Amino acid sequence: RKEVEQDPGPFNVPEGATVAFNCTYSNSASQSFFWYRQDCRKEPKLLMSVYSSGNEDGRFTAQLNRASQYISLLIRDSKLSDSATYLCVVNQAGTALIFGKGTTLSVSS
Amino acid sequence: GAVVSQHPSRVICKSGTSVKIECRSLDFQATTMFWYRQFPKQSLMLMATSNEGSKATYEQGVEKDKFLINHASLTLSTLTVTSAHPEDSSFYICSAIQSGYGYTFGSGTRLTVV
């Protein structure tokens, strides 16, 4: 079983749509959780950290359920510029980040 | 902020040759550097963890004699792909931790072995 699993998609949505990505992780000792964004042939960039209480950053909302070992990302009012691959990432303090395979989002006009 | 400079960004080499990839932390000291590899449509897979002044720790299935990692200073870590073959063609990327800034990635190296 892979440590971090995501639906690879692709998700093809029109501008303005709301889209949700899900992720599960297998290591219950994981302490930190993130969503990264990766554009084609580029390095991943931190989108947001994910906290148990849930957190929001503009159009992006992240949720964490430690009991179910489940992480989600909600994107509201999708923009063309949101087209990218979204990576679910977990780790334990001070150790390497463990990446999911990524979910590809394509937003069209 | 924390910046990690990685080069080359792209390299094409002949089968059997060696390629060195460098990652430098420009404005902080990186005691630990992580090296990842990403094949097309795959996730970033951790290859090894390098610590300044000590031997790197390799993940299961990664050949330490083929992927040589050197972390001789607090600002420089190198990955050398020895006797490269076409199956080593991939996107290689490094990452360092800086206290207060979290994880910073280099811009990646796209290696093509022909």
Image (cartoon, rainbow, N blue to C red):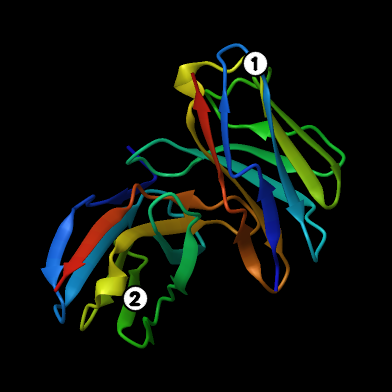
Q: Quadrant of residue B47?
A: top right
Q: Position of residue A24 (x, y in %)?
A: 30, 55
**Badge 1 element:** loop
Chain under disc 2 = A
The local crowd at label 2, few if under 14, some if 14 to 19, many if 20 or more residues have their Cα within 10 Å, is many
Work out how far the residue at label 2 is from the one at label 1, CA to CA, in angstroms.
45 Å
| Residue at horizontal 34 percent and vertical 47 percent from the top | A101
User: Residue A62, labelled with which disc?
Assistant: 2
> Mark 1 — residue?
B17
Q: Is residue B92 left or right of residue A5?
A: right
Q: Position of residue B27 (x, y in %)?
A: 80, 66
Q: In the rendered view of the protein, which quadrant contains the N terminus of chain B?
A: bottom right
Q: Position of residue A109 (x, y in %)?
A: 14, 74
In the displayed structure, A18 sits above or below B42; it is below
Chain under disc 1 = B
Q: Is residue A89 left or right of residue A95?
A: left
Question: Of B16 and B77, which appears nearest the observer?
Answer: B16
| Residue at horizontal 38 percent and vertical 57 percent from the top | A87
User: Residue A26, labelled with which disc?
Assistant: none
User: What's under tag 1, amino acid-wise?
Assistant: Thr
Nearer mark to the viewer, of 2 and 1: 1
Question: Of B15 and B105, which appears nearest the observer?
Answer: B15
Q: Quadrant of residue B100?
A: bottom right
User: What's under tag 2, amino acid-wise?
Assistant: Ala
| Residue at horizontal 56 percent and vertical 56 percent from the top | A92
Q: Is residue A90 left or right of residue A21?
A: right
Q: Are marks 2 and 1 on the same chain?
A: no
Looking at this view, name the residue that lies furthest to the bottom.
A58
Confirm or deny contact between disc 2 and disc 1 (CB under 8 A): no
The local crowd at label 1, few if under 14, some if 14 to 19, many if 20 or more residues have their Cα within 10 Å, is few
